[in-house]
Image (cartoon, rainbow, N blue to C red):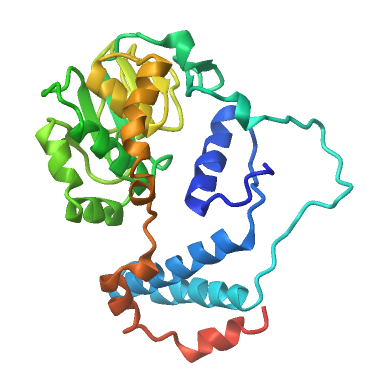
Amino acid sequence: IEGLSQLKCEQAFELSDASAERSAAGCTIKLDKEPIIEYLESNIVMLKWMISEGYGDERTISRRIVAMEKWLENPQLMEADPNAEYAAVIDIDMNEITEPILCAPNDPDDARLLSEVQDTKIDEVFIGSCMTNIGHFRAAGKLLQNNSQGALPTRLWVAPPTKMDAAQLTAEGYYSIYGTVGARTEMPGCSLCMGNQARVADKANVVSTSTRNFPNRLGKGADVFLASAELAAIASIMGKLPTPEEYLEAMSFVNTTAADTYRYLNFDELPDFIKAADTVNIAEDIKADLKNL
């Protein structure tokens, strides 16, 4: 994928993560160095925090840290040859996309415009999986908080992908919002997306932010739409898929605070993680082993 070089790594992961469900063997996205540098600097602090907390094998994690630091000293990226030939080139004009796109039940390849499926009754909504990041949960929280209808007409499931996301969302007050509207907050991780943990009701109409909507995966006989966290949150409030106009009206509130909403979890900016990282020293033999890579 080219033409989106300023995406944050978290945003790029959303596209590459979904590629396997769209019949692709793999996916690469051409990014500029800056978002990759930002991501690795954050991850180095996070990995050092993991060592300080006793996660995993210290030497294995240390090797990753040293390798990242070495790349940061002279950041170089692989690029396709200028004259590379492809089996096919698909050009997408982003200006022509004026409304959300969903995947219809129960096929992740069956993409539909929101206007094609608007007003479909929705019973349950799942916001979670590795297709989401902390910004999505803030946006969902703000949409839910701005809802003046009181109790939700749907069953809403919320499962941030990591414990760190959950902790930060709790600190910022979003878990209180989820609780107030009656959402079921799951243990951080895969939750409904795995298909072998919690399940939606039989034959439910569902909006999910997960990577896949294969038949019976989220629930027996369930019809599952794949959509963004923002659209999922709006559907949970309305009990149906909104019209494009209803979606844009609801999102106008979130868009006014986009800079705050879509902040990513940069661990090198979080005092507790920085403090823990400063206590970690990488063994000299590991540095020596990797210096000639």
Looking at the picture, does residue 58 appear above or below residue 174? below
Residue 203 vs 86, above or below: the answer is above
| Furthest residue toward right | 83
Q: How many marks?
A: 0
Snapshot quadrant of residue 292:
bottom right
Q: Is residue 180 left or right of residue 203?
A: left
Q: Image quadrant of residue 92?
A: top right
Q: Residue at x 89, y 47 (%)?
A: 83
In the picture shown, does residue 287 fall above or below 218? Answer: below
The foreground one among 8 and 249 is 249
Q: Is residue 31 above or below residue 118?
A: below
| Residue 11 visible, this angle | yes
Q: Position of residue 176 (x, y in %)?
A: 13, 43
Of all residues shown, which one is farthest toward the bottom? 284
Q: Residue sitting at 86 percent across and 45 percent down?
A: 84
Describe residue 281's horizontal placement relative to residue 6 as left or right. Answer: left
Quarter the N terminus occupies: top right
Q: Quadrant of the C terminus?
A: bottom right
Residue 217 in sight in this render: no
| Residue closer to the observer: 137 or 143 | 143
State the residue at coordinates (46%, 72%). 60
Describe residue 73's horizontal placement relative to residue 235 as left or right.
right
Residue 240 spot, x, y in % from top left: 30, 13
Rendered location of residue 61, percent (x, y): 44, 71
State the image coordinates of residue 250 (x, y, percent, origin top left). Answer: 32, 26
